[in-house]
Amino acid sequence: MDTITLWPLAALAAASLLVGFSKTAVSGANTISLAVFAAVLPARESTGVLLPILIAGDVLAVLVYRRHAHWPTLLRLFPAVAVGVVGGTVFMLWADDEAVARSIGAILLFMAGVTLWRRRARPEPPPEDEDTDGPSRGGRLKARSYGVLGGFTTMVANAGGPVMSLYLLSAGFRKLGFLGTSAWFFLIVNTSKVPFSVGLGLIDAQSLMLDAALVLFVVPGAYLGRACVGRINQKLFDRIVIGATVLGGLQLLLR
């Protein structure tokens, strides 16, 4: 990391700015930042560098959207996410870069396909912040499935954003409920990942020095996202999230 030249550093700075934007506007766009970090840095090490950047974006998103979170949905997800994080940690102990990238890419593409199919079957979204799953058996099963996948992918490659974006879209969340629930979810989950990442050697003094320079770009990105989110209509918002997920999945699968 101490040999990064100007242009790769500029790419990382742009990706950090996009982290801020994605946290306050289009969550699925995080896959682009993930791809840039994995292209400039070794894939495994890139997850450790990106994690503090994501946490900084999460803090800003919570400050903006904290009142719009749907806590019953969050509480339903967290136990399954914990299982996924532990599974991802075990996977990271033996997987190489290629195995990590292809596994995450395949999961993202599969979940995008499932979400598109579900949205065609139920085209009309519910009122904002409504969680359509309720306490039903099917809703709990879906929350557990997405929760485990989200925990696994966020631990392995910081790619839990697209998975959880697809879950929130499939549950019928609109923009503010989506962003508020997602902001709290990732602040809690990403913070809880720090001890695991340190234990795996993904976060160290050298990576934190790079983070100290890159985190400065998260703030203007978050401000830009907050300014733009009101201008993005619901259909376009959904399409951008799903499109970013598909592009990120393809990039990881075909790299």
Image: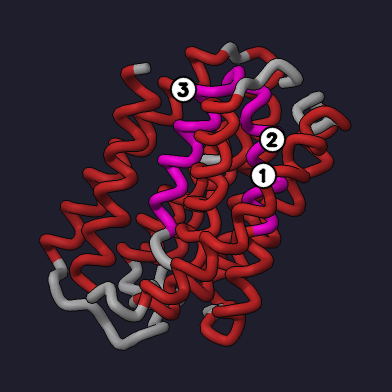
Residue neighbourhood size for the residue with mark 3, other residues' Cα within 10 Å, grouped as few (<14), some (14–19), many (≥20): many
Quadrant where the C terminus is found in the figure? top left
Judged left or right of residue 57, residue 138 is: left
| Camera-nearest label, 3 or 1 | 1
Q: Which residues are magenta?
A: 27-56
Across and down, in percent, residue 207 comes to 77, 31
Q: Is residue 148 visible?
A: no
- Which residue in the protein does label 3 denote? 101
Quadrant where the N terminus is found in the figure? top right
**Above-or-below relation of 111 to 104:** below
As helix, strand or loop, the secondary structure at mark 3 comes to: helix
Residue at image location 44% in from the left, 30% down from the top: 104
Proximity of marks 2 and 1: CB atoms separated by less than 8 Å:
yes
| Camera-nearest label, 2 or 1 | 1
* Type of amino acid under label 3: Ala
In this rendering, the count of numbered labels is 3
**Residue 49, disc:** 2
**Above-or-below relation of 182 to 130:** above
Q: CA distance from mark 3 to mark 1?
A: 23 Å
